[in-house]
Image (spheres, helix red, strand yellow):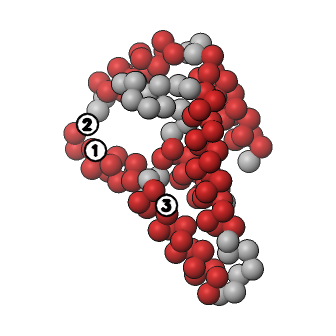
Amino acid sequence: MVVLTLIFVGLADEAHEREIFDIDHAVQDSVQAWRQPAARGAHAHAVDMGSGKVLVPLNLGVATMLWLRRYRDALLVPITGVTGVTIEGLAKWIVDRPRPKNVGYGFPSGHVLGVVVVLVC
């Protein structure tokens, strides 16, 4: 967990300083050239795994199941989810990194952070 946190902090610092910003465009162009229309459906499902429409019910369901089984720390599940969203918003505000099309903040990815929080916790 400490190693992952250090990697994240390093990436956040690079994103904030925009030192590698030009490389982003080259990587994006390269990745888009490799896109496969057949994989679009699988990608959409993978992205949905980190969305609120999946994570909120999942968090509530797991917390409810643990609560009904009298697990004393059942509320840690939704608290962890809310903390993850808070950290994401704070990190996006601090780094202030636009998305490639300049619509909102692009780093860190809320979907990826959501999945990581669920899987690590």
Q: Amino acid at mark 2?
A: Gln
Residue 36 marker: 2
Q: Amino acid at mark 1?
A: Ala
Q: Secondary structure at mark 1?
A: helix
Q: Is residue 110 above or below residue 16?
A: below
Q: Which residue is mark 1?
A: 39
Q: CA distance from mark 1 to mark 3?
A: 23 Å
Q: CA distance from mark 2 to mark 3?
A: 27 Å
Q: Which residue is mark 3?
A: 55
Q: Is residue 66 left or right of residue 112?
A: right
Name the residue at 39% across, 53% down.
48
2 or 3: mark nearer the eye: 3
* Crowd class of label 3 (few under 14; some 14 to 19; many from 20; radius 10 Å): some
Name the residue at 59% across, 32% down.
93
Q: Quadrant of residue 36?
A: top left
Q: Quadrant of residue 69?
A: bottom right
Q: Is residue 35 left or right of residue 58?
A: left
C-beta proximity under 8 Å, tags 1 and 2: yes
